[in-house]
Amino acid sequence: MLDNTKIMAAQKKEAVPSQKSGQKREQRVYLPRTDIYEDDEAIFVVADIPGADEKSTEITLEKNVLSIHASPVYEIPEKLSLVYAEYGVGDYQRSFTLSDQIDRENIQASVKNGVLSLRLPKAGPVKAQKITVKSE
C-alpha cells in the first residue's frame, strides 16, 4: 500500500467568497466533508455536496491540482417563511494536489444523492521499451 500523503494532498480552505468562472458571488464557500479510500488499483474520494447534482458540479485538473466546485440549488418552499436555520447556504470547494502516481487520463466522477464519488486510478509502473535505431 502506498503512502497517501505522497499520492494526494488535500488543500483546505475555510469559507470565503465564491469565484466561479471569473464571476464573484457574494456567498460563502464550504469545505465539503471528504473521505479518501485506497486499493491496489485506485484512490477513491467521496465528498458530501448536499443539494448539488452533476449539472452544478465542476471538476478541473490543472497541472497537479484537482479542484472540486459545486453550486447547490436551494429551493424555498412556496408560501413559507424561514423561522430557524442551521444549514448554511453556499457553494462547496476543495482542492487536492496529485502526485505523478495518478493516471490523469482515466479519472472518473459521479454524483448521486448529494455525494460526489471520484475514482483516481493509479498509474501502472513504467515499462522498459526497446527503441529501434534506424540508419539515415
Image: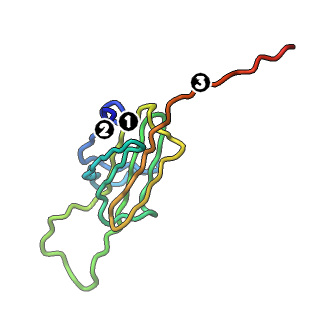
Query: How many residues crowd around disc 1 within 10 Å: few (fewer than 14), some, or many (20 or more)?
Result: some
Residue that label 1 marks = 97
Which callout, 1 or 2, points at the residue further toward the start of the chain? Answer: 2
Q: Position of residue 86 (x, y in %)?
A: 14, 65
Q: Amino acid at mark 3?
A: Ala
Q: Amino acid at mark 2?
A: Gln
Q: Amino acid at mark 1?
A: Thr
Residue that label 3 marks = 128
Determine which quarter of the picture holds residue 75: bottom left
Quadrant containing the C terminus in the rendered view: top right
At numbered mark 2, what does the secondary structure look like: helix, strand or loop? strand
Which callout, 3 or 1, points at the residue further toward the start of the chain? Answer: 1
Front disc: 3 or 2:
3
Residues under numbered marks 3 and 2 in contact, where contact means CB atoms less than 8 Å apart: no
| Numbered tag placed on residue 5 in the rendering | none
Q: CA–CA distance between discs 3 and 2?
A: 35 Å
Residues under numbered marks 3 and 1 in contact, where contact means CB atoms less than 8 Å apart: no
Q: CA–CA distance between discs 3 and 1?
A: 28 Å
Determine which quarter of the picture holds residue 27: bottom left
Quadrant containing the N terminus in the rendered view: top left
